[in-house]
Image (cartoon, grey):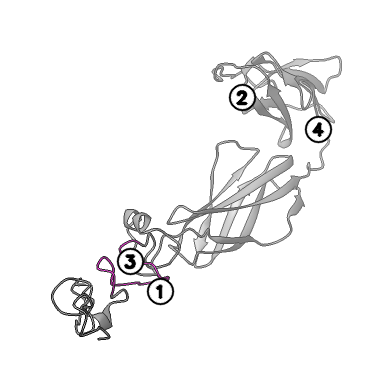
Amino acid sequence: MGTDPDDKTSVPTDLDKDGTPDALDDDRDGDGVANDQDVFPDDATESRDLDGDGIGDNTDPDRDGDGVSNEEEIAVGTNPDDANDFPDRIAPEVSIDGPDFISINEDSLTLRGNVSDSGSGVDRLEFSSARFPGARFAVSVQAAQWTANVPLLEGTNVLTLTAFDKAGNTAQLTRTVERQPLASDIGLSITYPQPGAVLTDAALVVRGLLRSDQPAQRMEVLVNGQAAALSPTAQVAEFNFQSTALNLQPGPNTLSIQAWVEQRSVQRSVLVTLGVLAGRLQSSVLLPWYK
């Protein structure tokens, strides 16, 4: 044992003070784990090192070495002793077929693509459009493929696809779609407000001119889905239109103006910004058709 038999102060080491010299002690740190099974045979507070990083499991904040702390794994329900079981932090993988910019003259667009998630699995997909604030459009998913039909307004439509997995991770893609106006002999112009105008009054009356190539029995204008008043001009096939006061929301507001002459229609949109705080939109505009 390497001690001096002629020196009473030279005695064999006995780490756990159990009376058995360490050289003869099968568990020299006295932690109940045999030396040959103890990764730390001289440390009574440690005996295992699951991830082999040199830090005992009792003090290692991430004992399985998967990059996620023991505390967090316990909180979310994964196993802190299994390096293959850890919280899903990876967003779904999603793609949209076709080009980034699309130009069509239809009132809706069907889009397709693929989606997958290697972690918790895909939960759902949804489309949103800058032209329809607050609206969400359903996406049909079959296996790894998805399909969606999204409505369009004339002009620029920025569409955003969001994929959600079951752990709450998300991935987003956007597509810009330019809807071209249909060929038409209907003239629809907005005289007020001008596109891009910054307004300070929440009450807004939209005004403009509707022109037909010939007299018609049905002429109608809707502003944000509500009928506007028509008044004749000196020209038999031209009418001024005026909405009742609309209450704008603070920030950007998209105005949609749609006109019918008989069964033909044309649509315009105008983006304006309200630069002061205002109350919520409360007015309801419902006026008769002019024939």
Q: Nearer the viewer, residue 116 or 206?
A: 116
Q: Nearer the viewer, mark 4 or mark 2?
A: 2
Magenta segment main secondary structure: loop
Residue 70 position in % (x across, y down):
35, 59
The image quadrant of residue 152 is top right
Q: CA distance from mark 4 to mark 2?
A: 19 Å
Residue receiving disc 4: 186
Q: CA distance from mark 2 to mark 3?
A: 69 Å
- Is 49 contained in the magenta span? yes
Q: Earlier in the sequence, mark 4 or mark 2?
A: 4
Looking at the figure, which quarter contains the N terminus? Answer: bottom left
Label 2 residue SS? strand
- Residue at horizontal 74%, vertical 21%? 198
Q: Nearer the viewer, mark 2 or mark 3?
A: 3
Q: Earlier in the sequence, mark 1 or mark 2?
A: 1
The residue stretch that appears in magenta:
42-59
18 with respect to 164 (left or right): left
Q: Amino acid at mark 3?
A: Asp
Residue 101 position in % (x across, y down):
75, 53
Residue 226's disc number: 2
The image quadrant of residue 148 is bottom right
Q: Earlier in the sequence, mark 3 or mark 1?
A: 1
Q: Is the residue marked by circle 3 packed among few (<14), some (14-19), or many (20+) residues within 10 Å?
A: many
Residue receiving disc 3: 57
Q: Amino acid at mark 1?
A: Gly
Residue 203's disc number: none
- Is 166 contained in the magenta span? no
Q: Is the residue marked by circle 1 packed among few (<14), some (14-19), or many (20+) residues within 10 Å?
A: few
Residue 225 position in % (x across, y down):
62, 28
Measured along the vertical axis of the image, is residue 172 above or below residue 281?
Answer: below
